[in-house]
Image: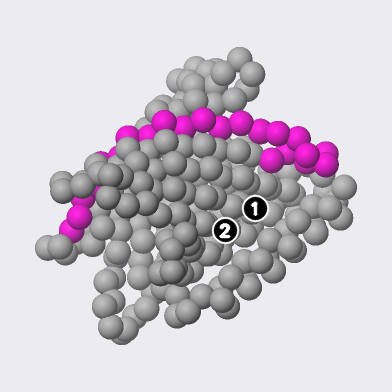
Amino acid sequence: MWYIKRFVFFLLLVINVSMLWAGNDPDFYWEPKLSSSYDISTRYTLQAGLKIRQDLKWGASGYSGIRKAEGQFFITRKTFTGNKLSLGYVYSGNDQFKPSVRIENRATLQYSFKSLLLGSKFSHRTRFENRLYPDDYVIRLRYRLSYSAPISGDRLDEGEMYWIASNEILWNLNNKSQDVEDRLSVGVGWLPSKDQKLQLALEYRGSDINTSKVGHAVFIATSFYFGI
């Protein structure tokens, strides 16, 4: 089945690159993330993370430096079927270090599960988010389909690298307006130990794709996950 896996990643990479070229003067960001988890028991896990968004258009008009800073905390319960139900809180600040900072408090309900297709496991994640701002609120619904596979062989062992790919649809709505986003990501990861992993991905984000004012952004996402 290795040839099917390679074909899937090649197809996603081609789609990703074509979307980047289709974008009209996209924004560029680097988004590093640090995430830690702790198993309270065999069924309950705590997870905390930090993430920033760095504007990469140095010298351009409207350059913002650190565009966003975010902290999050989740508690997850594994169900009897192996699926996961999570409750989370996210604090986020747009233009965090400027007088024009816009604070967001976000409550999240998440459900994730896996399915088998063509002999390969796909991961599904659904989220319901209540995003509260000082002068507004937004309800956001999210669905992400993701897939990962060892670069070589059929099983991922410690010290080996793997492919990662995902596509996520987001629907933002309140009593004033609604819009749809799409996030397509392709990258690689490394598993130095069973409790650690490093990931590097190229992500395309299209915003307001249900309107005539589609926005485009390219993200270089770096992530480090570790257990304690």
Way the structure is coloured: one colour
**Residue found at x 18% / y 58%:** 101
According to the image, label 2 marks what residue? 184
Residue 125 location, x and y as percent? 55, 38
Count the marks: 2
- Per the image, is 102 magenta? yes
Residue 10 visible somewhere in the drawing: yes
Q: Is residue 143 left or right of residue 155?
A: left
Q: Is residue 197 left or right of residue 95?
A: right
Quadrant housing residue 102: bottom left
Residue 111 location, x and y as percent? 51, 30
Q: Nearer the viewer, residue 50 or 21?
A: 21
What's the residue type where badge 2 is placed?
Answer: Leu
107 to 207, vertically: above or below: above
Question: Which mark, residue 164?
Answer: 1
Q: Residues within 10 Å of mark 2 (few under 14, many from 20)?
A: many
55 to 168, vertically: above or below: below
What range is drawn magenta here?
101-122
Question: Which mark, residue 8?
Answer: none
- Per the image, is 105 magenta? yes
Kind of element beneath mark 1: strand
**Residue found at x 38% / y 35%:** 108
